Amino acid sequence: MMARTERIAVVGAGMAGLACARRLADAGCAPVVFDKGRGIGGRLATRRTPDGLQFDHGAQYVTASSTDFQAVLKQARGDGAAALWNDGAQRTDRPHVVGTPGMTGLAKHLGRGLDIRRGIQVTALRRAGRGWTVSLPEEEADFDRVVVTVPAPQLADLLGSDHPISREVAAVRLDPCLTLMAAFDHAAPRPFITRTDPEHPLAWIAQDSSKPGRHAPACWVAQASTAWSTANLELTSDALVTLMLPMLCDRLGTDPAAVRYAVAHRWRHARVCVPLDRPFARDTSGTLYAGGDWCLGPRVEAAWSSGEAIAQDIVNASRRE
């Protein structure tokens, strides 16, 4: 147990924020998680339509190299929140795990029992005595410690560009990713489960409906290469569909007339290409932390490891105080 109950705010309910809050809660603390979105999970994202279609339009799967994260995924599978996906591309020692019935299943598994406040955007952080005042749309709240798990380029918006943490993470680079979600007639060709071609504008294509727990057939996700995404980042969703859908149909050998649904999504900060190379950033007071996958690398496990490391550092500090 922690030496005393602290009020801790976690900004962001992606994998890093959820991992941090989960570890803190298990240590006897009561973190409050704020997320601006309607759901949780960050890039552990699933788009659902009113007529029953669904697409994992962010992270496509999760792998684990550490025994600790392997244990997390094993428990999620045991609880029915995740399953193995045989896409024919994974290494035998690092199977591909997906959330069920969508990738958000993993986030919901980690978030069970946590105080998660959705649809609330933290607009500013201000030092207040030994702690922090968190500015919310309709109120302010005081906390002993704050953990921020937004993408590194967004930290300056909360902390100011001159804040030591903002300067510390200034060299971190995240590349964008444009994603197409498309559904076709049930009889349309399904020539493969996944296809990877870094040289093609559609660098990754996945038959999303082949994943366990998915019931809507003929749903596909195509993610553009970094170069193509960067070049077309500011186009509208409709314009992106106009460009990306014919390329997907060509790859699948599908008549465009078979398309039932198509929409594009812009991930502005998707792929970590220059990480911080340490698990988190922390201010000199030990009361403000920043973390995410951008600390360690472009994998979901990196986000989990960052959040876990932050929580452990807070637990250790609290025990010393």
Image (tube, rainbow, N blue to C red):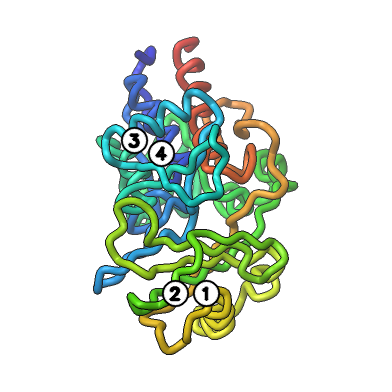
Q: Earlier in the sequence, mark 1 or mark 3?
A: 3
- Above or below 141: residue 213: below
The quarter of the rendered structure image containing the N terminus is top left
* Residue annotated with mark 1: 252
Q: Earlier in the sequence, mark 2 or mark 1?
A: 2
- Quick check: marks 4 and 3 in contact, CB under 8 Å? no
Displayed quadrant of residue 202 = bottom right
* Residue annotated with mark 3: 76
Nearer the observer: mark 1 or 3; the answer is 1
Disc sitting over residue 98 in the figure: none
Three-letter amino acid code at disc 4? Leu
Three-letter amino acid code at disc 2? Pro
* Residue annotated with mark 2: 189
Q: What is the residue that sits farthest to the right in this orientation?
A: 171
Is residue 291 shown to the viewer in this render?
Answer: no
Nearer the observer: mark 4 or 2; the answer is 2
- Quick check: marks 2 and 1 in contact, CB under 8 Å? yes
* Residue annotated with mark 4: 18
Helix, strand or loop under label 1: helix
- Quick check: marks 4 and 2 in contact, CB under 8 Å? no
Nearer the observer: mark 4 or 3; the answer is 3
Give the Cα distance between marks 1 and 3: 33 Å
* Direction from residue 152 to residue 273 in the image, left or right: right
Nearer the observer: mark 4 or 1; the answer is 1
Three-letter amino acid code at disc 3? Ala
Say which residue appears at 62% left-offset and 53% top-offset.
271
Say which residue appears at 33% left-offset and 36% top-offset.
77
- Quick check: marks 1 and 3 in contact, CB under 8 Å? no
Helix, strand or loop under label 4: helix
Q: Earlier in the sequence, mark 4 or mark 1?
A: 4
